[in-house]
Amino acid sequence: MNPEPEPEPEAPLPLPGNDPVPSAGCGKSDSPGSGNSFTIDADGMSRSYIVASPSGYDANKPYKLVFAWHYLGGSASGIALSGYYGLERMARGEAIFVSSQGLNAGWGSPNDIPFATALVEWMKDNYCVDTTRIFSTGFSYGAIMSNRVGCSLGNEFRAIAPMSGSGPIGRGRCQGQVAALVTHGTSDAIVPFSGGQGSRDHWVMTNSCGGDTSPDGACVLYQGCDEGYPVKWCEYAGGHTQPRGAASLVWEFFSQF
């Protein structure tokens, strides 16, 4: 497997509370629309994805952009049919969603990060996106992919919410920072609980958090993190499943930015 090319350093994203930063697609009246299956060339390979833009899409309004990655054996169409892990309903027209198709119904190809990079640029060029509020989530292998983009594309993504995943792999090539909501079941027999703990520990270290935590509902927030880059950890009794109320939990986390 060829190593992924190391991204070029970029300026960090503005902190939460900043005004939206519109993308190049703002003001364009001919957006590609919603519900279609698209393909894009990424590093010499054709990759597919589905976009859902809000009904009543306004080409002059910068929207949040949410990438929802499927689990192993899943599909882009399955995630779209699920309402992007239920987040589309939570967003109430305030976000554009993307579900992408992994090779062999999974993630881990050397082409995946070039694909994600090309797709972020395509979305910014063709839709009105707030470039400071791009998010990623996924379950299982989709969580692993969220950790990967958080590492490799931290200067594009604002926050991630991996559910029952592990990683990121190749941490030495991480760029920028992302806020992170990490959730994992203590009895997970597919992706071990220790994998989720490892992800948590990576983001705690990356965001310079301390060891102390404070309760936040059924979860905990790490204290002393770099301003604007919180790390929230949610462990729960259960196996390889999404946490109860996953959609509201993830959307609440993204909405603070």
Image: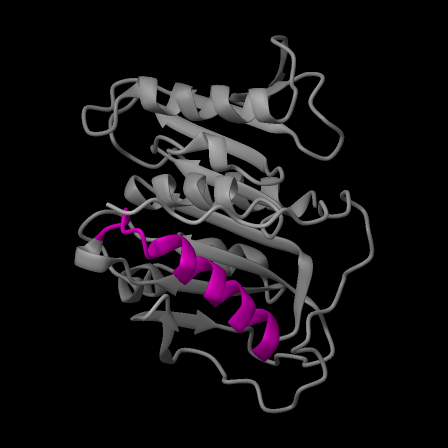
Q: Main secondary structure of the magenta part?
A: helix
| 166 left or right, relative to 155 | left
First to last magenta residue range:
106-126
Q: Residue at x 58, y 44 (%)?
A: 154
Q: Is residue 2 left or right of residue 119?
A: left
Question: Residue at (73%, 68%) from the top-left corner?
Answer: 22
Q: Quadrant of the N terminus?
A: top left
Q: Going 34% across and 44% down the picture, which residue do you hit?
A: 3
Q: Is residue 123 magenta?
A: yes
Decide if residue 54 is in sight here: yes
* Coloring scheme used: one colour
- Count the marks: how many? 0
Outermost residue on the top side: it is 212
The answer to whether residue 245 is visible is no
Q: Position of residue 14 (x, y in %)?
A: 77, 47
How far from the left and from the top, in percent, is residue 224? Answer: 72, 17
Given residues 120 and 135, the one toward you in this image is: 120
Seen in the image, is 5 located left or right of residue 70?
A: right
Q: Position of residue 207 (x, y in %)?
A: 63, 26
Along the viewing direction, whichever of 204 and 108 lies nearer the viewer = 108
Within the magenta stretch, is there residue 227?
no
- The vertical placement of 167 against 64, above or below, is above
Q: Is residue 16 placed above or below 215 in the rendered structure? A: below
Q: Indicate left or right for 90 with 36 as reference.
A: right
Q: Return the x and y of residue 101 as percentages of the image width and height.
A: 29, 62
Looking at the image, residue 181 lies above or below residue 148: above
The residue at 37%/26% (across/down) is 184
